[in-house]
Image: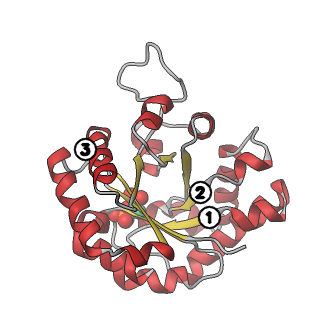
Amino acid sequence: MARQTLIAGNWKMNLNHLEAIALVQKIAFGLPEKYYAKVEVAVLPPFTDIRSIQTLVDGDKLLLKYGAQDISPHDSGAYTGDVSGPMLAKLGCSYVTVGHSERREYHGETDEQVNKKVKAALKHGITPILCLGEQLEVREAGTHVQHCTDQLVAGLKGLKADAVAKVVVAYEPVWAIGTGKVATPADAQEVCAALRKQLAAAFGDDVAATVRVLYGGSVKSGSIGDLVAQNDVDGALVGGASLQGEEFTKLCAMA
Ligand code: PEP
């Protein structure tokens, strides 16, 4: 089954809600409708921007999808500062990144918490983009494939095959995020193929053939073509380049 390419822009902690409107307008202007038949495009802004983007996307009937960068494992309650699945669903979020390396590193998120967040997203009809990837020392030790498949197994623990089929996986080597050092297409393919093999072993060939596996880490318009040409790379999670309207639309058009 053909998997539609997905390009998701992770804005991280950048742009207020007015700047968000300006960037979404630029993206909408730069990507005419015909592109969306081949490539699905999503933006993942900070929580504070989502309502503005929802209004813009709904009002202008834009084909652009949007989502969030984190989700609470809980539906509601005394969890100061957190934002829940029902809140994100009400805002029309299609996607949420879970387990981004910056959350694992700066917020100490464990595989167990990541797993709970994947489940919370699925419970509320939001597609989790399960992020995983190795640090430089792991790659240098040559254990990166095992590291990534272990993170995948932990992130999907307790899920049935039909739920896993709805998940997006993003392979993001930590040494490539925000560093300008993009993985070679062969390096990205090696890990993405191993992740798909793991999905097949645990959940069956149909699920493995359905799940989209993205690459993330310093992707730009000049590198996306060779990455998505790999058999097991179904798109990209894009950080820095997703904040520049012209570069991001060029990247989407090249995907
Ligand atoms: C990211 O934050 O997920 C990311 C891939 O960032 P960058 O493209 O800036 O490396």
**Residue holding disc 2:** 168
Tell me if the residue at label 3 has its CB under 8 Å from ligand 1.
no
Q: How was this image coloured?
A: secondary structure
Q: Look at discs 2 and 3 and give the one toward the viewer.
A: 3
Say few, some or many: other residues with alpha carbon within 10 Å of mark 3 (under 14 / 14 to 19 / 20 or more).
some
Residue 177 shows up from this direction: no
**Cβ of mark 2 under 8 A from ligand 1:** no
**C-alpha span from label 3 to label 1:** 28 Å
Q: Which residue is found at the position 34% from the left and 60% from the top?
A: 62
Most foreground residue, 108 or 122: 122
Query: Between marks 2 and 1, how big is the CA–CA gap?
Result: 5 Å
Quarter-of-image position of residue 244: bottom left
Assess disc 2: are there few (<14), some (14-19) or many (≥20) residues with their C-alpha within 10 Å of its C-alpha: many
Taking the image as drawn, is residue 180 in sight?
yes
User: At label 2, which amino acid type do we have?
Assistant: Val
Q: Residue 16, position in %: x, y?
A: 18, 45
Residue position marked by numbered label 3 in the rendering? 52
Q: Which residue is mark 1?
A: 212
- Quadrant containing ligand 1 reads bottom left
At x 69%, y 72%, the residue is 193
Mark 3 residue type: Ser
Image height check: is 56 above or below 231?
A: above
Q: If you read the primary sequence from the N terminus, does the residue marked by circle 2 or circle 3 appear first?
A: 3
Residue 204 spot, x, y in % from top left: 84, 59
Q: Are marks 2 and 1 in contact (CB under 8 Å)?
A: yes
Circle 1 SS class: strand
Residue at 43% x, 42% y: name it.
92
